[in-house]
Structures are given as structure tokens and as C-alpha cells.
Amino acid sequence: MDRRRFLTWTAGGAVGATVAASISHFEPFLKKREAGATRVEVPTTCEMCVNKCSVIAVVENGVIHKLNPNPASPKSRGMLCARGNAGIQQVYEPARLKRPLIRAGERGEGKWRPATWDEAWDFTANKLLGVKDKYGPQGSLWSSTESFQETFFKNLGLSFGSPNIVRHPTLCLASVNLAYSATFGTVPAFDLANAKYVIMSGANRFESFITPDTMDLIESTTERKARLIYLDPRFTVTAAKADEWYPIKPGTDLAFVLAMLNVIIGESRHDKEFVNTYTVGFDKLIDHIKSFTPEWAEQETEIPAKHIVRIAREFSDAAPRAVYYAGRRSSWYREDFQTRRAQAILNAIVGSWDREGGMVPNGKIALGEYDFFPWDDPVAPRIDEIDKNFPMAAKGDGAYLKLRENVLAGAPYPVKAWMIHKQDPMNALPDQAKTIQMLQQMDFVGVIDVQMSDTAWYADVIFPESTYLERQDPVEAMSGIWPVVVYRQPVIKPLHDTKPTLEIVQGLAKRLNLSQYFDFTIEQWVNAQVKELPIEAPLEYLKKHGIYVPPDFPKYGTTLNSEHRFVTKSGKIEIFSDRLQEFGYDPLPLYHPPAQSPPGTLRLITGRKAYFTHANSTNNPWLNAFDPENRLWLNPATADSLGVADGQLVEAASTAGAVRLKVKVTQEIRPDCVFMLHGFGKRAKWQRLVAGVGACDAQLLETAWDKVSGNAALHETFVKVRKV
Amino acid sequence: MAHKKRYALVIDSKKCIDCKSCVVACRAENNVPLRYSRNWIDEEHRGEWPRLLAAYEPGQCQQCESPACVRVCPTGASYQRPDGIVAINETECVGCRYCIIACPYDARFFREDKGVVEKCDFCAKRVDRGEVPACVETCPSKVRVFGDFNDPNGPVRRLLESRRYYTKKPEAGTGPQIYYLL
């Protein structure tokens, strides 16, 4: 049944087309319910994305009936998104991982035999010890993405002696983090609830949720409390809701920011007192930005100079309630770090620091720590040689793409075992062909996950983790303007033969003779974490409420006194950075134009829908129904020149690979770009709704990274599109 | 002073970001199989690059004051509660589907698996427990405001007194109780 109809536009008659909803024929798991059911409500924490929203699970007769938002959370602001609501499907998914599996065919062939836990542990420990004997502990690689039990997995890798822990930041926000750290000595939050002027480059906040930013920005924008200026080559939902949208030429955001600096400093609109008291290097900036005029920026960005001038004036007038929002996934271009640095500097010189409506240093709540037995630090250097390649980067997280290059080259040493915790490098990393090569050159690949990801599909052993609604997790303190402590407790017993990560790790630790480092229970760990919270009976409190909200936030102005020392080399906010200069980077952001599309090619850009989390929820039937197949967005002018029509099959090819998918002809993208949703065209057949459906962007994206942070640069790929 | 309750919904469509939270929340709360939906989000896209507009608008049963569906129902399965909620008594429904034809808003569907007609009932079970409908509660941008139209100090009336609004197809004469803010 097609549920979508035309709107009645209040301004006049309706024109334009609706998109026909394709509705999947899959019948969801039907919950059996009877009258007089027992009904309990259990507060817990969502794990459908990284926001950790507070949830109240309604459980009837032992079956999860509904996940409701917990209104007590100042982070999730009493909401639960489509993914959060669809969390039920992760539990009752018929094709989820239900027992340990050992590969029975070739890698990627999808042939498995069920195994007992002892078998899976023995097999894995044996392989890991074999690699250790032959190549040393550094021959093993441990990769993971942020989750509450990630620490146990990481600690297993470290206690095993491997320096090679690689996490998600260089596929995500490493360039933002590094740019703000280099400037302010910390990564601040943005007070969108109180800002009056917000500029956003591409951080499509209305389709890529961050709490509480998304909700605060909707409220501010639609209630006309804030003006939103949005730059994006694509007309997203955020563009539709913004006060002004500029389809900026991709990769030129830095030119826009530099021109804003030029106007604000040229017209002496910066906050002189703030600049004098809290920053260093402003004098060097004055000369630096002189040539970056709005007229120059217009040539680069295609945003008219008069608008750049006006926006710069409005921005400085609204300061300190004005922010150039940093965004999250900042893995776009090779110059990302400098773009983010320039935004940070712009925010600083108008004094939007540590004040209501500006950037605010994150409030933090300290948790206790369980004292586990310490291990010796790994001896070998990291395989990605991060000290040499990215000397300013966060060492512990690694640099994923450089790491893959070095593993493939076998230099500086061979890496032959890969343990992966709830991460899907097959989709998360660009250039899938290389990821497959990397998997194939391993002597052993082990995966811990809740579902059969494309990466699990290539594993030798799969350990099934209990879903977030079936397990007890460590407590998590979330920093922010409104910091909170969130609690995740099981709302039902595990449905299948699955285990939480800690128990999976302990089983391996025992066989690797590392038990002394994991000699505790989850309860002991949690008790140690919560015992110093300033509340009576903290554990009982968290079990009952699911969240602890400290009373004394938000706090503004804690750093605004001349005594305050910022965690930078100079102790001040660094507009000019000596450290950057020492390492051979531009100490002030200098504009390097982005690579231009070779004739006959289009720039591939990536992005989100609010109901999908990266590549991992496209197979959730309740979410998949909204977009059952991804298509390649083409502007009508581009489609005409290629001779393709809406719905026709095309081949898109880059130097990394080629894919085939259908075209969506839409006005909502620049004529020089193409866009496709992430998480389709999967290889794992168990992901039945998206296996071989649509196409996988990771097969097209080429390997490129930001020079300073090592962050993947996902918008540096040009594709040729042809009708097939 | 006690008054008779009359539940109504105010929808501020300009806050809607098409995130589908309401659609999934309804599906879970009311056990609606995937091929059906009790609520939905209409969307419209207009203009030519780069002068573009897009708008999103949530839709569902309009909980009419004089519901056409109730009038045509031969068995009394479709009925109106004293608090105004238009509901369906599944055990009385014979699946004749007159109501589907009568509804000016296309808000009803026939469930092949159960042989009955279904639609939004403002999550009556939740409302009876003192909660708001699932779509109202879960929304990240709080597009919907639910309450008693007859409560002069309630959120519904306060909004309607301070903002301009319209109802859908008032010419159908069914007195829809979902108010869309302009």
C-alpha cells in the first residue's frame, strides 16, 4: 500500500512528485501476546548508534514489546529515534548470530559449522599463539569501535603484547578532534540550545543524529531562536530546514572560512578583549588572511562574495552566541584538519568560547576504576608507524588506512592475525578490494559481533555477542554540556547461545594464559565504577533510573579567568601553532584547492539517512522498508548528458572498483557530484535484505587521508558513470 | 471544573525532519506488520537546482468529531469513545471495508492476516494508562502535541490560541481533530 500522498502547500497549489514507497514483503517477527500479560518496565541504554540514548524497555511475558524514550535524559531529550525503536528487531532477527561459528569453506564463501564455545576459544587461542610464536605479539591486530565493553577487548590485545590496537576515529572525527585540541587543548561541545547563529559545513545534523545537538538545533531553527547557515553540495533535510543553504563547491569550505576571517578582522569585528586575554598568534593571523578576500572565496566556493560578507558580519554580531559547528564525521578531504582548524580559530576570535550559546568545554563525571593486574607495555612499534607518519595524532587509536597499507606491504613487519570487535572494516573502510586483500593475507581472522557483517563473512571464527538488550554492560560516563552517567542492564535473558564480550574475552584469556588480567566479574567492575558517584546507593539508583544526571550543569565560564591554563604549548588558545610548525604543517590554515574532477568524472560524496547507522542497520526490516535499495543520485542535467533516466541501471567506476546500481534523478544534488547511501550491496548473504541489493560505496571509494590526522578522506574519489 | 475530555493532536509539520521515528514507534507499539502502517510521513519536493524546497508532514487517522467510518459501519465495530477517540473493536469487525471507502483521509487498511480493518487509535491503551501516544512521545523534534481539546489550559488549546492552523479536508464535514499549525 502506498502511504505517501501530496502535501497541501500552504503557500499555494502543490506541484512536484512524491516518491513511491517501496515496501518490503518481509513479515516481521510477530510477538505473541496474551491478555493479562505481566508487564515490566526496565530502564536501560540504547546501542543502535553511538549516542547512548536512555530507553525504557517495556517487557511483556518476557518479550520486549516496546522501547520508549526515557524523559530523564538531558542528552537524548526524551526522544527515541527510528533506530532506537527498531532495536527490538536486532534481538528477534531470525538470521542473527546465535552460536559460535567456525568457517567450513573458503573465506567469504559463507560456509559455516556451528561450534561449542570451548571449540571456538581453543581454535582461536591456538591460532593466536601460533602467530605470536612466528611473528611476535605485534603480528596480531585488534580493531574495535566505541562500545561499552570495548575496553575488555582492547585490554586483551594489549595484554597479549600487541601495540596494534586500531579504533574508529580515523574513519570518523579524528581531524576535528585534532584541530580543536591543537587550538584549545580540548574538544568542546557546541551549545546549540542557546546559540543564535549557527554555520554548518555538511554536518547534516537532521539526518545524522547527535544528541542533544540534533534536537536542540531543530528547536532553535524552527522556533526561530537561531539562524542556520548550511553548506552542502547536496540538498539534505538540514538544507531544507536551514535559513540559508549554499550548495558549495565540494572541498572549498576552508576558503569560505578564511574569507569570513578576512571580513571580521578587516572590519575589526573580532572580540578584542577575548583575543588579547586568551589567545596567542592573532597578530600573525592579521597578515595571513589579507589575501583571502570574499571575492577570491567566491571564485573557489561559488558562494557570492556579498553573502560571505553579510554572513561574516551577522556571525560576529551574534557572537558569543555564534558558532561554526564542528560536526562529527569529518573524514572528507586531504585538507580536513586545516578546514577544522580555521573554523576553530573563527569561533575563537569572536569570543564564542565557554559562554552560553558558544563552544563549551565538556563537563565530565569521574567514575571509579576496577584495579586489574597491570601488564607490560607492548615492546614493538605500531604497524602504522603513527609516530612518524602522524606525529600529532592520538596514538592509541591508530591511523586505519595507513595501517592497512603497511599490513598489505608487510612493513615494517608482518601482521597475520586480525581480531575484530563489533566493527565492519569491509564497509567502514574505503577501497574494499584492499580490505579483502588484507583479510586474505591473514593466517587468522576472528570476529565478535551481534550480526553477520560483511567482515564476519570473511572470518575464520565468529563469536556471537549478546545484544544490548540481553546483557549487563559497564557503566558509561558521557561528557558534554549536560554530562550524564548511563546504565545498561539486561531487559531479557539471552535468547540464544551468546555471551557478553567480557565472557568471550575471559574464555580467550584463559587459553592465552592471560587470566590474571581479567579476574573479575562484570558486577565487580560496575561496583568499582559507581561507588564514588555522589548519590546514595548508586547502583540501585542506576538500576531504577537508568541514568544519573548531576545537578550542577550546565556550567559556563569555568575557563574564563586569566589564571586558566589551556592544555596547549603556550597555555593559551593557539591561533598560530608552534607545534604545527615544528612538525612541518601550516601553523596557520593555508588554502590548498581540492583536486578537481578529471573530465567525464563526477565526485562521489557520502552521507546519511536518520534511520540508518552507518552500514549496520540497513538490514533491519523496520528500517530497511524506508529505503530498500540505494540508488545513485544524479542531477537531471548530468543524467541528460549521460543519457540515463530515473531508475535505469548504470555502472559507476573509480580506480578502486566498479559497481552497478540504479539511478535516482534528483534536483537535490550538484551536477558535478553523485551520492549513494552507505550499507547496501553487501556480501554477507545472511543480511538478506541488502545482500546484493543496490551497491556498496566502499567498493568505489579510493584510499586517501587527511595529512595531519590520518583521517580517511572519503570525498576525494571521482567516478565515471555509464549506462549499462 | 470537570469537563468532558476530547482528545486531539496538534502537528507542527515544519519541525518534521522525516526521521521516521513515529512510524517505527507505532509499528512496535501496535504490532503493525511491515506491509501496513497506521501513520506515515508525506513528503514534497519542489523547485529546480539550486532553488529547492522540501517539506514533510506526518499523517494518520484524523480522529474526527463526526466520523464517517463509524456512521457506515454495519456492526458497530468502529466506534467513538466518550473521550473522542475513534477506535475499532476487532471482535465485531467483519471486514466489509465500508469504512475504508468512507474515510476521507485514507487512514484505514484491511489486515489480510486477521480479516479486520485497522487504523490509528491514538494508542488508546497507552492513553488509558495516562501516557501519550507512541508517535508523540518518541519524536526527536516534538512535532506532535497531544492533549484534551476541552481543557482550556491544556497544551492543545494553548497552541491553537497562539498559532494559526488548519485541518485537512474540512469540506468532508467529519470534523477532524488533528490540527496542523501553519
Image (tube, rainbow, N blue to C red):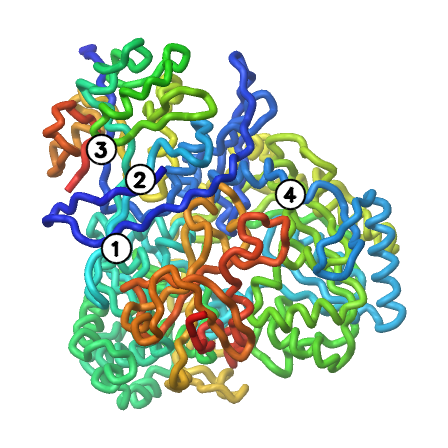
Q: CA distance from mark 2 to mark 3?
A: 10 Å
Which residue appears at 80% of the width and 62% of the height?
Answer: A160
Pointer 4 chain? A
- Circle nearer the viewer, 2 or 3: 3
Category of crowding for the residue at label 2, using alpha-carbon neighbours closer than 10 angstroms: few (below 14), some (14–19), many (at least 20): many
Q: CA distance from mark 2 to mark 1?
A: 15 Å
Q: Position of residue A274 (x, y in %)?
A: 30, 71
Pointer 1 chain? A
- Circle nearer the viewer, 4 or 1: 4
In the image, residue A166 above or below residue A641 = above
Q: Amino acid at mark 1?
A: Lys
Which residue appears at 31% of the width and 27% of the height?
Answer: B108
Label of residue A96 in the image = 4
Q: Which residue is mark 2?
A: B142
For the residue pair A73 and B94, the one nearer the viewer reads as: B94
- Circle nearer the viewer, 2 or 1: 1
For the residue pair B87 and B117, the one nearer the viewer reads as: B117
Category of crowding for the residue at label 1, using alpha-carbon neighbours closer than 10 angstroms: few (below 14), some (14–19), many (at least 20): many
Q: Which element carries disc 2, helix, strand or loop?
A: loop
Q: Which element carries disc 4, helix, strand or loop?
A: loop
Q: Are marks 4 and 1 in contact (CB under 8 Å)?
A: no
Q: How many numbered badges does the structure rendering display?
A: 4
Q: Which residue is mark 3?
A: B10
For the residue pair A496 and A104, the one nearer the viewer reads as: A104
Going from N to C along the chain, the mark reached first, 2 or 3, is: 3
Q: Amino acid at mark 2?
A: Lys
